[in-house]
Image: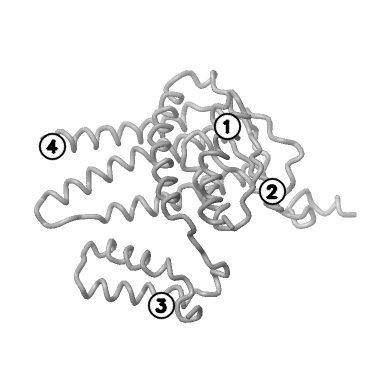
Amino acid sequence: MRRLLPHPLLAPILALIWLLLNNSAAPGHILLGLLLGWFIPWFTLRFWPERVRLRRPLTLLRFIAVVLYDIVLANLIVARRILGRPAALRPAFVRVPLELKSDLAISLLANTICLTPGTVSAQLTPDRSCLLVHGLHVPDAEALVTSIKQRYEAPLKEVFESC
Amino acid sequence: MLEYLLSFLILGGAAFTFIGSLGLARLEDFYTRLHGPTKATTLGVGSLLIASALYFSTRGEGMSLHEVLVTLFLFITAPVSAHLLAKAALHLKLPSLAAVPEDNPPAHPVGNSPGPGPHKRA
């Protein structure tokens, strides 16, 4: 079972992407999509050593909703900062200590930090204990770290690492 | 009615994309400039894509959801490129308005870094 279907989650996702690429939901395309969804993960097995497990799909959905909301809100804030006086900005580097362990969760966290405007993740320490984040306007470094940890890290930890 | 909504979305998207590129000109160091084009544009491109999906879905040729994929790929690639740019800038020690943490451990072992030439090795 494991060798035949190494990534059960990836198959439906790839099938969905195939349908979106073709902009159609004809039975033939669904079949071809599922076939590709089975074949591609099998073919690229060596590049995916870790088996991905979602433990709380609902938390993941809530996380996505929070991130989308933050993107819209923070876009407005960054737009206002750009149009305002650039001299008033207080850019800063902030260290975020990480509790996440798995590769996928860390890269999702770094991606999320980059997507929400106002922060870019700049570097991960080699031992993966700490992420260096650059903020466009950081009046309070502590508050930024707490909000990243609460809003993004905690749900990711629940979804990918809860034991 | 739909046309008003579509034009609102397109104009709004264009405005956000423009503000994002304006950031490139107005902000002062590499790291802050990185914020404008990589991110103020997510909302801009997002509303342009929603407008496109709405327009092609209501023309009577069935749903058009290509745009979801564009969003997906954008959300996967944009942060990665921003992260790599920031990392390269740290490595090159570009001038920064914010204080760069000094004890920042190098990303690669020191021996491998293409640093100052051979005279240092002797």
- Residue at figure coordinates x 24%, y 36% from the top left: B9
> Residue at label 4?
B3
Under tag 4, what secondary structure? helix
- Which chain contains the residue that carries disc 2? A
- Give the side of residue A68 with respect to residue B59, left or right: right
Q: Amino acid at mark 2?
A: Ser
Q: First in sequence: mark 1 or mark 2?
A: 2
Q: Earlier in the sequence, mark 2 or mark 3?
A: 3
Query: Which residue carries the number 3 mark?
Result: A39
Residue B75 in picture, x, y percent from top left: 42, 49
Q: Is residue B42 left or right of residue B101?
A: left
Mark 1 residue type: Leu
Q: Nearer the viewer, residue A51 or B7?
A: A51
Residue B94, quarter of the rendered image = top right
Q: In the image, A25: left or right of A127?
A: left
State the separation of the CA atoms marked 4 and 3: 43 Å
4 and 1 marks in contact (CB < 8 Å) = no
Indicate the chain on which mark 1 is placed. A
Return the x and y of residue A91 as percentages of the image width and height.
Answer: 58, 28
Instruction: State whether discs 4 and 1 lie on one chain.
Output: no
Indicate the position of residue B122 as horizontal and vertical percent values.
90, 54
State the image quarter where residue A37 is shown. Answer: bottom left
Tag shown at residue A129: 2
Mark 1 Cα-neighbour bin, 10 Å: few <14, some 14–19, many ≥20: some
Alpha carbons under labels 3 and 1: distance apart: 43 Å
Image point (19%, 46%), residue name: B54
Q: Residues within 10 Å of mark 2 (few under 14, many from 20)?
A: some
Chain label for disc 3: A
Q: Secondary structure at mark 2?
A: loop
